[in-house]
Amino acid sequence: MTSPADVYSLPPLPYAYDALEPVISAQIMTLHHQKHHQTYVTNLNAALAAHRTSSAKNDVSAIISMQQKIKFNGGGHINHSLFWRNLAPPGQDETDLISAAPELKDAIVARWGSFDAFLEKFKLTLLGIQGSGWGWLVVKDAIDSTGKRLDIVTTKDQDPPFIDGQVPLLGVDMWEHAYYLQYLNNKAGYVSEIWKVINWKVAGERYVGGIEKEITFKL
């Protein structure tokens, strides 16, 4: 029997469902968190339970068949858990890059020449995503503090952003369920407005110290 400690659960939001308005509506946040993220958590737990059963039976075929379900739903849980925390209500101190994350601001300027140039590059990257996926600001070679390099990357569907040791600093969900009820087919509007609710304080802390002290995905 699986105990509560052996399953993943839906993490609470660090703000109210209407806290990101008018950038992201309470309706979207409620559905996105309670329905979409919860579905990933539920399906992840089911896939892991089936994997444990198959492993106990040494059923290699069944074990292999579970891998994509674990990747998709586990990635959905990871990505959304990171996403909620890299958002903050508009106008709060955390949404001001200069005061909230000066080290990250300097790194962005050093990498792209200016914040405006970085923002334009990120927006174009997001709008270039075909189908569903995510856009991420990541730091590579983060283990070596002298070799940190920022980059803008995309991941398909719910693939998680942990590749070759890169650390995700902030992510933008480009699945339609993240914006369509409010922005309809104006994807560019969503891509422009979401920067008003980016939590640069969290992104800056991830840049300096990684995500291990902030959040864990280990049971």
Image (cartoon, grey):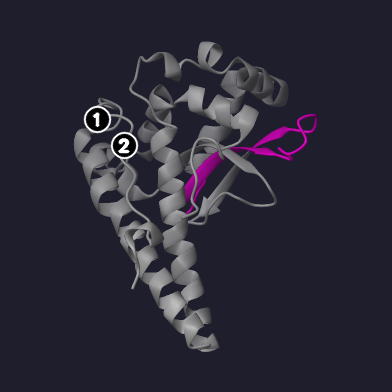
* 48 with respect to 107 (left or right): left
> Which picture quadrant has residue 150?
top right
Q: What residue sits 41% from the left and 61% below the top?
A: 73
Please provide percent x and percent y for residue 154: 56, 47
Q: What residue sits 22% from the left and 29% below the top?
A: 18
100 is higher (above) or lower (below) than 141: above
Please provide percent x and percent y for residue 58: 53, 88
- Indicate yes or no whether the magenta region holds residue 137: yes
> Which picture quadrant has residue 1?
bottom left
Q: What residue sits 68% from the left and 25% below the top?
A: 112
Q: Amino acid at mark 2?
A: Leu
Instruction: Check if mark 2's residue and mark 1's residue have beta carbons within 8 Å.
Output: yes
Q: Amino acid at mark 1?
A: Ala
**Which portion, as a residue range, is magenta?**
128-151
Please provide percent x and percent y for residue 96: 47, 15
| Residue marked by disc 2 | 13
Q: Is residue 174 visible?
A: no
Q: Secondary structure at mark 1?
A: loop
